[in-house]
Amino acid sequence: MAIRVGVHVDNPSLFFLSHLEHLLDDVEIHRYTDAARTGELVADGVVDFGGTGSTPPLTAQAARLPIAYVAASAPRHGHGALLVAKNGPIMTVADLRDQPVSLRVGSWQTHFLAKALADAGLSYQDIEPRPAASEAWLWLRDGVVSGWVAQGAELVEAERSGHFTRLSGTAGVVSDRSVFFTRRSLAESAPEELAVLVRALREADRWALEHPVEAAQLVVEAVGGSVASWATALRRLPWRLEPVTDAFAAEQQDAADVLYDAGFLAARVDAREAVVPSLNRIVAAELEAVAV
């Protein structure tokens, strides 16, 4: 059977897989732009397999969509950070109370910011979320917003500019994994096919690890920016896939609780309801075999 894989530029592993034709046997590529809709697309059968950060699959679970976790990247501690203006009035996360903060609402950044605020004794409802745009770094530099969650090449370039200070990275706050998921019915009926897809995804990761400049050129062709900055950003990623484990499920549960308490999720979520042990055993064996 051909598995329909959803691809958007915010998930580098899937993006690079879509450009490596020798890895695409029995794979159909469906490109789209709004990563936050991935759970809906998977549940509706538009795609069979998708990848995002921690938040979209939890949004899907809160909407009672029948998703199932397949695999996850290793923690991506160099991927993103919360920035503030250098020498500005914001010195701690607690200083963001009642302030506008730019972020990609609905992405992993929502989980990260909500957790960072909670750790500082605040709530996501205590700040004014501003959906991120290409002008976000100008907004922060000029004082239109007081904080900005940046990632990838935009983070590299922002920190090189000298205008901003890193208020918080993700390390010690959230794991910031790429999370890959499918429909539960497919997880139960086609685990071997999904494991083969995970193998291809692992090979795409290996290619990106070994060819950061070529990988950066592909991203620049898609979204623009600097090859040098994208290559630096890509080198910060772990490029390692891991199976779904009890520890991962616990991380997602913590994220679900944080997002519900923040008022972002419409309902409480049990992350383990999206875990399919029979699939996990097969994927874990595949990843172990690839690693040898």
Image (cartoon, rainbow, N blue to C red):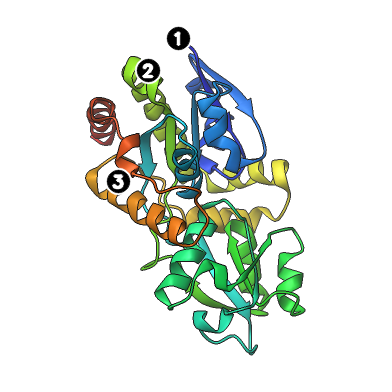
The quarter holding residue 154 reads bottom right
- Measured in 3D between alpha carbons, the distance from the residue under mark 1 to the one under mark 2, in whole angstroms, is 8 Å
User: Residue at horizontal 33%, vertical 44%?
Assistant: 270
| Of the image marks 1 and 3, the number of the one nearer the N terminus | 1
Is disc 1 in contact with disc 2, using a CB cutoff of under 8 Å?
yes
Image quadrant occupied by the N terminus:
top left
Amino acid at circle 1: Met
Q: Which residue is mark 2?
A: 193
* Amino acid bearing label 2: Glu
**Which residue: 59% across, 41% down?**
35
Q: Considering only order in the chain, which callout, 2 or 1, is on the residue closer to the N terminus?
A: 1
Which residue carries the number 3 mark? 249
Q: Relative to 269, is 288 above or below?
A: above
Q: At x 66% / y 33%, what residue is drawn? A: 32
Q: Left or right of 185: which side holds 263?
A: right
Q: Which residue is mark 1?
A: 1
Foreground residue, 272 or 242?
272
Crowd class of label 1 (few under 14; some 14 to 19; many from 20; radius 10 Å): few
Residue type, numbered disc 3: Ala
